[in-house]
Amino acid sequence: MKSSAFSDRAPIARTSTGIAGLDEMTNGGLPAGRTTLLVGGPGSGKTILALQYLVHGARKCKEPGIFVCFEESPQRIAANAAGFGWHLEQLQPKKLFILDAQPPPDLIQAGNFDLGGMLAVLDAKIDQMKAKRIVFDAVDIILDLLPDAAAKRREMYRLHAWLLQREITGLITLKAASHDARSSGDGPLDFVQFLVDCVVILNQAVALGVSQRNLRVQKYRGSAYHENESPFLIGKDGFDVAVSRTLISHGAKVSRERVSSGVNRLDTMLGGGYYRSSSILITGFPGTAKTTLSGAFAEAACKRGERTLFVSFDSDANEITRNLASVGILLERYVKSGCLRVISARTITGSAETYLVRIKSLAKEHAARCLVIDPVSALSQSGNEMTAHSVAERLIDWSKADRTTLVCTSLIDELLSASDGGSPLHISTLADTWIHLNYLVQAGERNRSLSIIKSRGSAHSNQVRELILTNEGVTLADTYTAGGDVLMGTLRWEKESAERREAEMTYISGKHKTMLITAEEAEIAVRIKSLQVELEAKQAEKAMLSRSSAREAGEVSQGRTRMRELRGADIADRPKRQRFKVSMP
Amino acid sequence: MKSPVKRLAKFKFRLYVAGDGQNGALAINHLTTLCREYLPNRHEIEIVDVYRDPKRAMEDGVLMTPTLMKLSPAPVRRIVGALSQERTVLQTLGLSARHP
């Protein structure tokens, strides 16, 4: 636990419990050489936790342990442990010893007694085994035989003092009525909580018929610890305590690698695809092709040869492959090759925690690099509203830490949010990429639209696109915007063809107009020609006219001269006129 | 007095105590008093300290101290506690009816 801030200088030695979540809550485990009290109601998992603690110690920490059972026979405990695959017989008796301390049913009691005999026996056993851990399971059974509170208290003190003196790490389990497990009431054994160094409380609550288990560290002397309740689950390997998010996601590597969404144009819109190990949320109303889009992602992942897990809460595995095949997403061959695993996890009952643990272990089992959960909103059903959010949060954190690319779909109830509402789990804020699918109802058609609401760390298109499903696959089409309206489907097609026609018309009329103008031009040219001809004629006429008038004038002057000549008149004023003529030019 | 002694079997007891604790001392006291009164000359008491001999305690499954084991006559009976409730002890040993 190097990542934790306060454990670096913690003076208290700790013993790992083998339960990752609990170790994290206590910064490394139960206090070594000290006593821890485990309180829980019936069926809360006290015995299992205690036994897991010993098994882990014996297997992984070289710390042999002794299990003192007051309630169950060693045979039954071994049988129960076998259910978790712990194989106690491999550890017994050298590393793990189970002491049967059940009071015989025909026990006759006459007067006060103490646990001296047991401690003497244990003393001998500890020395023989070099045991480091010891569990007293259901110590209340034997304390109940004691006549009064004072005697109970005395024996408890005796036990505690003995544990301290032996410097062995002790774990004592005690029953608590489930309703008062959260707070220390005033039961006869509540003083034990003050005696010991660490108290862990197991709690089982039922909300709307769904069991929710919680674990809480109530006390940890000399150390900081996570004080909040943390959900846990008894899975097939034993305890699984949910880990708080801050620590696990700490230092998770961030990838710049892009992975395809399975739709080429969507990749382009996202600037290259999803980021590796990011979480993608696809929200939408029923039937907006959420599953199809996530199927496309799964197919693309399998094409790259990445192991993929597809968890469906809606439909059967075979149904999914069949339905997706109808839109050209062929998953069957990958299922056969083992690259893809399709799991159907119908939402029947079970807490959100159960699902998370199942998904996690399935992903681990399959070594999945890509994970699809369809829909993740199923987690919030059946009484899980309270916890589903944190589960979804931890799902995202876990996938990040595990470097798994996670695609979740989330159903949006049409009544809940008609607008671009967030998903009911509010994981929309946590997801790195949020794609929203919607319907656009226009002219008697429902058309699917796709928009990227956010995509952290990458430029992305702001356009709403039309999502088209065909036999060949999924594609996106540009939507048609006309006069502020987004047109899709047939309307888009109609509008497009109308525009085409219009353009043709414009072209034709343009041509027509050109021709007309050319004709006019020609006409004008002709007119120009005729006018020119006319002009020439006029000019010619004018020239002729001037010539004839000059001749006439000549003839007149000639006639005058001749007349003068004939008359013999003098030419007194002639030079004057000649001089005038000379000065003219 | 001779015939009933022969007729009646000898009582063999094993009493486990934890060191010299109070309960153990009480139990030894109670047992010897009882034997003197009800089983004169036909009893045998073995006292085992669990701290000295934890192996035997384990073999006999004795975890609560003091524990009295009546080994014979059959059946074997065990009584846990300081034997302070005489009635219960006598009843368990099958003595109360014959020796009121």
Image (cartoon, grey):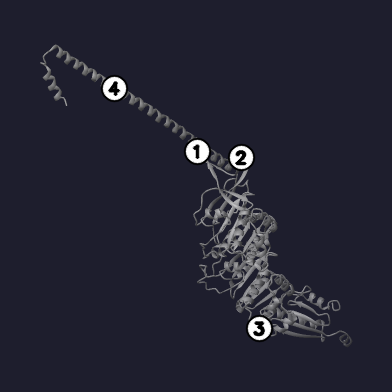
Number of residues whose C-alpha sits closer than 10 Å to that of mark 4, classed few (under 14), some (14–19) or many (20 or more): few
Asked if labels 4 and 3 share a chain, the reply is yes
From the viewer's perspective, is the residue at label 4 or at label 3 nearer?
A: 4
Element carrying mark 2: loop
For marks 4 and 3, give the CA distance: 155 Å
Chain containing the residue with disc 1: A
Q: Chain of mark 4?
A: A
Sequence-wise first label, 2 or 3: 3
Residue A44, picture quadrant: bottom right
Disc 2 sits on a residue from what chain? A
Q: Which mark is residue A443?
A: 2
Which residue matches tag 3? A128
Q: From where the camera sits, is residue A346 visible?
A: yes
Q: Cα distance, mark 1 to mark 4?
A: 55 Å
Q: Quadrant of residue B60?
A: bottom right
Whichever of labels 4 and 3 marks the residue nearer the N terminus, that label is: 3
Q: Chain of mark 3?
A: A
Q: Is residue A184 visible?
A: no
Q: Nearer the viewer, residue A145 or A532?
A: A532
- Where A205 sits versus B63, above or below? above
Name the image quarter holding the C terminus of chain A. top left
Badge nearest the viewer, 1 or 3? 1
Disc 2 marks which amino acid? Ala
Of marks 1 and 4, which one's residue comes earlier in the chain? Answer: 1
Nearer to us in this view, A19 or A175:
A19
Across the whole image, how many numbered discs are drawn on residues? 4
Percent x, y of residue A361: 64, 65
Say if labels 1 and 3 share a chain: yes
The spot of residue A244 in percent (x, y) is 57, 63
The residue labelled by disc 1 is A507
